[in-house]
Image: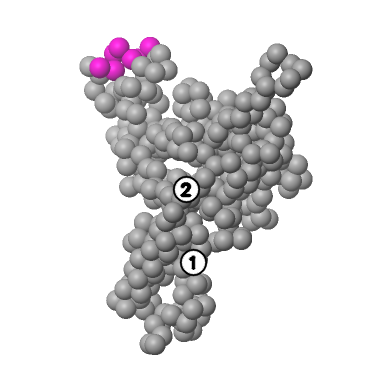
């Protein structure tokens, strides 16, 4: 979404003037410039909201979606990665929700014999998912070189972002997963823009909204997890129990396993080629080069070591990889 499109959407008084107004003046009017008069700079939020490639300034400004048809624990090697969702933050949110609405969210309509009204339930209430996705993009740290990751399993959708909740929020409040009210906000200006676009409600209502929507839908309560260092924020949105497995997460009914195996082989060959060129290559470097997240690379490295394809020589930082000749 460009600046002028945004102004028109939110009904700003600047919408008509923006057509002929110089960009620098428009940014000033929208409070998107900072610094002394002799050296004005564009604020970070301008790149997040209106730059089509914000990852140039904030690496890994993207959402990565992985589907696990058999579950991450029971069948971790059977997975399907969706093409990375990039662009402005509003576009990322919209495209992510479009995917979830089209491919994951399904509705079940039941007509009780003793009631004239039909009962409508969803495997995942759309509003709960939207709040969780918006919160992940709003509250994440854009200084962390990690994407927002969404793992979809038959019984739960997990949304992971970095870094974690502010330390002003107690661990007890996080465990209760009801109301997280920080004393300070990360990306406050971004939150204001998302509120104007009606993506978020603001006022720390995201988690309560998620829990209310799940309760109204007859779904179990969402769970939140972080660590003492507050380095990540993870929320599990559970599926309504009587609709678990209702969505076919396989790519194709006949060849999903074969397709997953081919993807694994292709990625592992890339890793082998990278190690041949540079035995000291890091997990981070491979993730950047192959445009996948570090968890994906780590998963392949563990499997390749277990299968006797590669081994690690030396320490984690100062060591190197070695290909085992068979």
Q: Nearer the viewer, residue 215 or 160?
A: 215
The residue identified by callout 1 is 298
Magenta stretch in the rendered image: 13-19
Asked where in the image residue 222 lies, by quadrant, the reply is top right
User: Residue 244 vs residue 176: left or right?
Assistant: left
In this rendering, the answer to whether 320 lies above or below 239 is: below
The answer to whether 41 appears left or right of 99 in the picture is left
Q: Secondary structure at mark 1?
A: helix
Residue placed farthest to the front in the image?
A: 113
In the displayed structure, 19 sits above or below 299; it is above
Sequence-first disc among 2 and 1: 2
**Residue found at x 74% / y 46%:** 175
Q: Residue at x 29, y 34 (%)?
A: 38
Q: Which mark is residue 65?
A: 2
Q: Is residue 233 left or right of residue 24?
A: right
Q: Position of residue 73 (x, y in %)?
A: 61, 60
Q: Label 2, secondary structure: give it.
A: strand
Residue drawn at 40 percent across, 58 percent down = 259
Front residue of 71/48: it is 71
Q: Quadrant of residue 42?
A: top left
Residue most extreme to the bottom = 326
Q: Give neighbour class at mark 1: few <14, some 14-19, many 20+ (Cα, 10 Å).
A: some
Nearer to the camera, 164 or 26: 164
Q: Quadrant of the C terminus?
A: bottom left
Query: Looking at the image, how many numbered discs can be counted on the residues?
Result: 2
Taking the image as drawn, is residue 41 in sight?
no
Q: Could you tell me residue 8's position as x and y percent?
A: 36, 16
How many neighbours does mark 2 have within 10 angstroms: few (below 14), some (14-19), or many (20 or more)?
many
| Image coords of residue 224 (percent x, y) | 67, 45
């Amino acid at each position: 979404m460009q600046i002028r499109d945004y102004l028109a959407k939110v009904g700003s008084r600047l919408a008509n003037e923006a057509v002929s107004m110089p960009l620098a003046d428009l940014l000033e009017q929208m409070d998107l410039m900072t610094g002394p008069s002799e050296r004005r700079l564009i604020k970070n939020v301008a790149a997040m909201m209106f730059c089509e490639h914000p990852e140039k300034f904030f690496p890994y400004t993207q959402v990565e979606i992985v589907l696990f048809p058999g579950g991450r624990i029971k069948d971790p090697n059977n997975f399907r990665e969706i093409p990375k969702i990039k662009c402005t933050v509003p576009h990322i949110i919209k495209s992510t929700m479009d995917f979830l609405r089209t491919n994951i969210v399904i509705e079940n309509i039941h007509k009780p014999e003793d009631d004239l009204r039909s009962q409508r339930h969803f495997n995942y209430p759309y509003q709960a998912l939207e709040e969780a996705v918006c919160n992940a993009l709003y509250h994440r740290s854009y200084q962390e070189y990690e994407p927002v990751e969404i793992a979809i399993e038959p019984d739960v959708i997990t949304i992971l972002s970095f870094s974690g909740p502010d330390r002003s929020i107690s661990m007890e409040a996080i465990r209760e997963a009801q109301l997280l009210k920080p004393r300070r906000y990360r990306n406050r200006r971004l939150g204001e823009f998302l509120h104007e676009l009606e993506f978020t409600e603001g006022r720390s209502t995201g988690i309560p909204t998620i829990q209310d929507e799940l309760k109204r839908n007859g779904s179990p309560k969402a769970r939140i997890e972080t660590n003492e260092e507050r380095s990540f924020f993870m929320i599990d949105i559970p599926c309504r129990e009587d609709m678990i497995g209702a969505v076919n997460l396989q790519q194709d009914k006949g060849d999903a396993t074969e397709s997953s195996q081919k993807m694994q082989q292709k990625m592992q060959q890339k890793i082998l080629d990278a190690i041949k060129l540079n035995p000291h290559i890091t997990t981070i470097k491979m993730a950047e080069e192959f445009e996948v997240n570090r968890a994906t690379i780590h998963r392949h490295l563990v499997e390749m070591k277990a299968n006797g394809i590669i081994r690690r020589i030396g320490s984690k930082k100062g060591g190197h990889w070695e290909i085992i000749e068979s």
